[in-house]
Amino acid sequence: MPEGRLSHWGFGKEVAFGTPVAATRYAQFISESLYSKIGEVTPANIVGVFDEGPTFLGLKEHTGKISTNVYPDFIGMLFMAGWGADTLVAAESAPGASPSSSGGSLASATYYVKTAPIFGGSVTPASGTFVGVAGEASAEANAVVTGPTGSVTVTPVAVTGAIGFIIWYGTATGAENLAIVTTGATGVITSTTVGGAVVSSTPKAGSNLHVFNPRQANWGTGSIVQPLTMEIHRDLGQAFQFSGTAIEKMMLKFGIGSKGADAVLTGEIDVIAKDLQFISATTPVFDSQSPFLWNQAAISLAGAPYVTIQDLQIDIDNGIEGKPYIDGTNEIHSIVAKSPRIVGVSGVMLADITQFNNYVARTRGDLNILFTGATLGTNGAYRLMLDIPLFQYIGYDIGVAGPHEIMVSFKGKAKYDFGNATQPAVGSPMLIALENDVSLAY
């Protein structure tokens, strides 16, 4: 008797649309409903009896949903296919470091410096803090300062999409222990006193940051998005292998811990596949990390922590469909566009007059969701960030349902970000960044 608990799910990145490839990643999953619908063609003929006449094979369609908990390694493959290709943010070369005998309170010494780009929602130099994620520390530079009123102007290597930089520094090579942040192309080190804009921090090393850039051009022949081959073993001897699989929709959701399963970040994808084959069942190797959990999430609105959200859901609709043509087959021919891509946000929060006024005024602000999991390397961690620079409410259903606290169901959209004077354009409704132990781009 086939049992669901003996099933597994794997996927690989296709080079040519519809040409199957072996699974390169496997994922634990909650449920799947990837069904095959085999159409039937019934000619409108009168055949001399009460019954229908001969029928013929029609269009083969393979569609469905897969639900899974979100683990920090394999989810990158789904972001790559359902959102866009990732850039692996490598450690930059050494920054420029120009000493000065004025402009600060640095004593005479050699100062050693490393930098890293920051991606996300906001950088606040006045407090030395930022909302977002930073890359790995750069190579080291140094500057010899003549004190006691010295300073060092640091010029990091420019990084596309970065909203600022973290600058680590200290007076011994490889032992930087202080940091400032900057939103500009340069930052100035003026003090070694912890407090204000100077914080204790250690350069990040030993983790990998993937920044997923949303697709703005067709992937290639046959599909506008990156296709995958998906393999589902259903404890039936052979595995179902779906080739030319495109992610039509992607959803991420989580809630408060008292709701059991909702306390784990859950993902769901809607897929369209070109063809189905059967292969010998393979042996899965799952990610060894833990999934992201609700109490690892930090949510901020307009750069400030926001702690009264109870449930949150992000929906990506790629606006695609499978299209058949007269090409000598009974399969879909291509994955094509049918509507604009839309990123929706919904959830439940404690009633807030400021947010209601933002809804009425159609005010747009940054919404940042950051999951921080287990420690990875030095000053790193398994992290997932979703940053929406221009979040706008489209619904805020406030009302009194009883004597208890007043909760609000809200809906919103991520609007396309063309950038502004203080922040570079994300070039999409949302930026996704994933920090993990995967050392190559997906």
Image: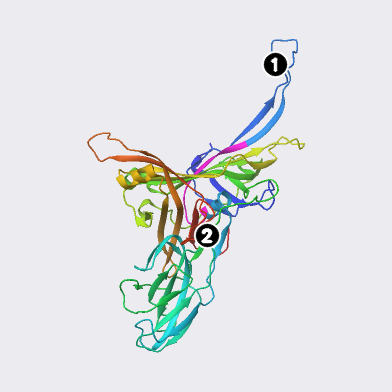
Disc 1 marks a residue whose amino acid type is Glu
Q: What's the distance in space between the residues labelled 2 and 1, CA to CA?
A: 57 Å
Which of pointers 2 and 1 lies earlier in the amino acid sequence?
Answer: 1
User: Does the segment drawn in magenta span residue 141?
Assistant: no
Q: Position of residue 45 (x, y in %)?
A: 74, 16
Name the one closer to the observer, 324 or 116.
Answer: 116
Specify whether 61 is left or right of 138: right
Could you classify mark 1 by the number of other residues whose Cα lies within 10 Å: few (under 14), some (14-19), or many (20 or more)?
few
What residue did someone put label 2 on? 211
Name the one closer to the observer, 149 or 260.
Answer: 149
Q: Is residue 63 above or below residue 27?
A: above
Task: Identify the image quadrant of the C terminus.
Answer: bottom right
In the image, which residues are magenta? 62-75
What residue did someone put label 1 on? 52
Q: Is residue 224 above or below residue 371?
A: above
Q: Position of residue 323 (x, y in %)?
A: 67, 37
Q: Tell me, yes or no, if residue 352 can be seen here.
A: no
- In this view, the residue farthest toward the right is 328
Q: Is residue 188 above or below residue 73?
A: below
Q: Within the image, what quadrant is residue 43 found in?
A: top right
User: Does the segment drawn in magenta span residue 74?
Assistant: yes
Q: Position of residue 29 (x, y in %)?
A: 49, 46
Q: Residue at x 34, y 43 (%)?
A: 356
Disc 2 marks a residue whose amino acid type is Val
Could you classify mark 2 by the number of other residues whose Cα lies within 10 Å: few (under 14), some (14-19), or many (20 or more)?
many
Q: Residue at x 66, y 46 (%)?
A: 223
